[in-house]
Structures are given as structure tokens and as C-alpha cells.
Image (cartoon, rainbow, N blue to C red):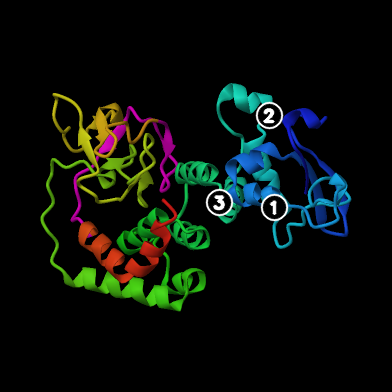
Amino acid sequence: MSTVNSPNETTQGATPRITDVLFGDMVFFKVPRYRFTQYSEVFADMFLMPQAEGTSDRVDVEGRDKEHPILLEGYQAADFAAIVKILYPLPEDTISGSYTLLKGEWVGVLNLSTKWQMKMLRDLAIAKLSSLSLTSVEKVTLARAHKVAKWLKEGLSEIVAQEESAPTPHELKTHLGIETAFQLVWIQNQSLKRPHVPSNPSTVTLRSLGCSNGHVVFPNGKSCDSCYLQILLDDPDAMYVNSDTGTPNHGSLIGLQILRCKHCSGRPVSTTYYCPSCSARVRYTSFKFLAPSPPSNTNVDMMAVQEQFKEEIASYESWGQ
């Protein structure tokens, strides 16, 4: 990577290009320097370092030009290209107020922003990825790779609580390691030994939101569409009915505009979904309110997860998410 000091010193404008390919798989980028130093403590410190003695010429300084680039060994060009899209957005991205990045690109942004101490970009990448469909296993693997405490708690809690489409012990061992697999299976076994509490028929949970054929639309839970906080399948304290009509009857259609997230008071569900069981299209105005089934010990399981993995969770919380 080579840099220039200000946006006026490059002919490439706000859209940096891959200008050349060097030494086999090495990709050369030429980008303005100012936003890297603005948002990254690592790059700010790098460019504040004094030049070596006897190097008065600018071209001898690392990153000044193509002949003296900053070598980012061990990094993926695709990750760097993704973070450049955020630092120097296209005009259409600026106008629309959003970024057209794919899931893998957001993971790349998260990867580099974590390594280069770019907190604002890290928080943005976490928020964007939280709004996408991350599986419970993905949350745990991404949490461990990029130090995201909330994903670790959510992913492990979801695995313990899942009944349908839950990962098998072999999948847990393969993706999360044998120690984690044993810990999660132990928590699940403890949960089975505890007596279930009778369900409250007036409680609205994600398990009570179904398609027209009576299937649960969010079997793995989902994040709130307003604040992106994860809502577990059987959490009775995550949502409330914001209506004078009270809780609807079981089997009736429910417009989810009456539901509110207890964390942010925004709408937890605000768009159209497709049922994962039968592919039926479900508008947020026409979910079927399902009769409650025996609840799992969700809150107790969450506490067990946090106790078993408390040291790892604590080590990630210092990163701010």
C-alpha cells in the first residue's frame, strides 16, 4: 500500500483502485492517507514516527510511493479493499447513506478495524453483521476471531437453547473445539434435568410468531430490527404489546407493528420474512399468533453459559462490544 497525504493529492478521488499486481499474489493499492491516520491509532503512530537518519528525501519514507510501499504481510487484499470502501465511499453510497458491502466484506472490515484499532469502523461492522442472518456457530467463531463479547454470549446461549436445527456434537467439536462442545453439552444436560415452569399464555415470544401454516418463523431467534440486540426464542422479557387491545388470541393473525422491543422500544420485526420450514411468505402485518409450547429454561441456561465462559467473555468485553 502506498499513500498520499490529502484527498487533493490523488487523481483517484474517493474511489481508490487496485492499480497493479506485484510479486505473484501481492496486490498494490494507492489510497489517500488522511482517513487511515484519522480513524486508526496504528497508522497515526506509524506516520508520526521520525525518518531514519540520513533519509531527507520524501521518497525514502515507507508508504510515500509505489517504490516504497507499506507491506501488509499476512493480510487479505479483499479485506483491505472492503475497508477502503468504507473509508472512501462511492458517491452513490454517500447519497443513499448506506454501504453496498457483502457479508464477507463486512467480516473483512471487522478483521482489519480490530487489528488496526479503528473503533468507529469496528462498531459499524459489528452492527451491520448483527443485522444479517448469522448462525449461532458463526457468532461464536466470529466472536473468538474478532473479540466480540456479545456474539459469544448470544451464540453459545442460542446453541444451548436450540431444539430444531441445533448443531450436532460433531459439528460443535469441528467448528468450536472439543472443550467448548463438552461444556455446551453439559449445560444442555443440566437444562433437561430442571423442571419446566408452566408457560404464560399471554406472553409474546419469538416462538409464538408463526406463518400461516403454523410453523415458527424464527426458530433460532433474531436480532431486533431497531437496535440489533439479539432476541432469544423463548425470552419472555424481550418484547411487549404496545396496544390497548391486549395480547391477541392464539391462532389469530397479529400485526407486529404492535410489538415493541423492551430494550429500545422500537419495532423488533418490521419487514417481510419467509418461513424456514415451508417457505411461506409472511408479512410483518400478518403473523399467526401460536399457542405457547413448554418453555425452555432460557434465562437459567444463559446464566450457565455466562458462568462457564466468564473468563473468555470478560477478555472480550474490554474491546467495547
Q: Is residue 93 left or right of residue 276?
A: right
Q: Residue at x 61, y 50 (%)?
A: 108
Q: Which residue is mark 1?
A: 49
Q: SS of the residue at dot 2?
A: loop
Mark 2 or 1: the one toward you: 1
Which of the two residues, 40 or 120, is positioned nearer the viewer here? 40
Residue 269: percent from left, percent from top: 35, 34
Magenta stretch contains residue 274: yes
Q: Which residue is mark 3?
A: 117
Counting residues from the N terminus, which is met first, the one under dot 2 or under dot 1? 1
Location of residue 298 with respect to 290 vertically, above or below: below
Q: Amino acid at mark 1?
A: Met
| Start-end of magenta stretch | 271-297
Residue 298: percent from left, percent from top: 24, 58
Per the model, the C-alpha gap separating discs 2 and 1 is 31 Å
Q: Which residue is mark 2?
A: 90
The dominant secondary structure in magenta is: loop
Counting residues from the N terminus, which is met first, the one under dot 3 or under dot 1? 1
Location of residue 253 with respect to 315 vertically, above or below: above
Q: SS of the residue at dot 1?
A: loop
Q: Is residue 139 visible?
A: yes
Per the model, the C-alpha gap separating discs 3 and 1 is 18 Å
The quarter of the picture where residue 247 lies is: top left
Location of residue 52 with respect to 123 vertically, above or below: below
Magenta stretch contains residue 293: yes
Circles 2 and 1: CB atoms closer than 8 Å: no
Which of the two residues, 116 or 248, is positioned nearer the viewer here? 116
Mark 3 or 1: the one toward you: 1
Mark 3 or 2: the one toward you: 3
Q: Is residue 51 left or right of residue 148?
A: right
